[in-house]
Amino acid sequence: MIKIDPNKSPLSLYIHFPWCEKKCPYCDFNIEVNKKDGDEELLLKAIIKDLDQSSHYINDRKFASVYFGGGTPSLVSVKIIEQLISKLTNEELLQDKCEISFELNPKEVSEDYLNDLVDAGINRVSIGIQSFDQKTLTSLERNHKSEDSFNAIKLASNMKSVNTTIDLIYGIMDQNLDSLTKDLKIFCDYDIDHLSLYQLTIEPNTIFYKKELRLPSEHLVESMEFEAKNILNKNQLFQYEVSSWARNGSQSKHNMNYWMYGDYLGLGPGAHSKVTTKDNIKRMVKLKKVASYILDPSKTVDTIITPEGYDLDLAMNLLRVKSGLSFDEIKNNNIFIQDSFVEKIEKGIKANLLERDGLKATDMGYKFLNDTVNIFN
């Protein structure tokens, strides 16, 4: 029996806007490219209805963070965002100093638009820059140019009323070490305290998956990761999660809630949730098509986390945290540990993949994180 008090589990909110101008060939997110007049308003009503019908999952808790993701949320009118934040505020569903994040395409970044977002209640923006190198952007078939990347980071860096993170990708076709190094040094030239740095992965059901791509060798990817660590550490940015780097305590509260096994409620087409109830822990996925979600926003496909699957589900999240967790931190964060989990930790210690005292991957264990996680299968 998994013993967790649902009232003590921190709760975040994710809201999914699925629309994009085009589908990037490496993207396996739930997106649509055929937004029509009136769709935004219909989706807004469905999301509000979904929120109202989720009170039993919220369970008198307040959201510690809110994340507007997609898709490309910046294709949606700021008025829609403002109405949703007003709804959450008026119903007292937000904690004090709630982190409210919003994803942006560099093409949509302007001083006026950023100010409008701040006025609506956004206090953190995530800009999908991916690269400052036009050749790299062309390889990714992005719909923005290098000048858009430079314009976006310059504007965001100068705005002190909103926190900013940007995304960069490495391990791209025909990308060399010099290209990534230049991207990272450009990022470090600006006053931004958070970076999401992702290795390009070719997922099934993506356009790239069907092509024969010339990706960098494993040796080159390792060199990129080594150089990235050197450059970022010299600029006081330190890795705190698999793909996340921060300085000055600027870690993403929303993402850390995921990895610390907190609860999150997902609203919008294809949105994922993980919620703790008095009976079980449940993962849910909303209907993916916009039209289907609008017709029935509460319908989900559910997976119950069984005691047999709990250890792996827990390890897949907690082990992403670079600094690891002491057993006191695990207990204080309302995370239940089964006896079987402790036994598997011992196996990981013997394999030199886990350190003793708490839950923390060794340097080798973090490098080969999939192997480390699979100890808990």
Image: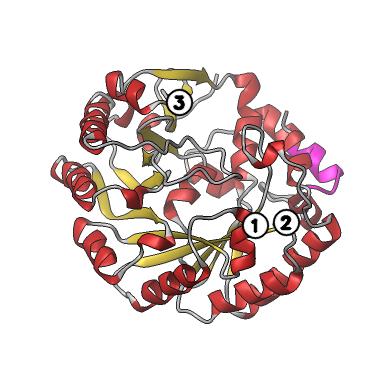
Image-quadrant location for residue 198: bottom right
Percent x, y of residue 345: 74, 39
Amino acid at dot 3? Val
Percent x, y of residue 156: 38, 71
The residue tagged with tag 2: helix, strand or loop? loop
Marks 2 and 3, how far apart at CA: 32 Å
User: Which residue is painted at 60% across and 52% down in the image?
Assistant: 321
Foreground disc of the pair 1, 3: 1
Q: Which residue, given by chain and number where applicable, does mark 3 sit on?
A: 285
Q: Which residue, given by chain and number where applicable, does mark 2 sit on?
A: 173
Percent x, y of residue 258: 49, 43
Marks 1 and 2, how far apart at CA: 6 Å
Pick whichever of labels 2 and 3 is earlier in the sequence.
Answer: 2
Please give the label number shown on residue 57: none
The residue tagged with tag 1: helix, strand or loop? helix
Q: Are marks 1 and 2 in contact (CB under 8 Å)?
A: yes
The residue tagged with tag 3: helix, strand or loop? strand
Foreground disc of the pair 2, 3: 2
Give the residues drawn in magenta, as a range: 345-353
Mark 3 nearby-residue class (10 Å; few <14, some 14–19, many ≥20)? many
Q: Are marks 2 and 3 in contact (CB under 8 Å)?
A: no
Amino acid at dot 1? Ser
User: Which residue is painted at 86% across and 43% down in the image?
Assistant: 350
Foreground pick, 343 / 239? 239
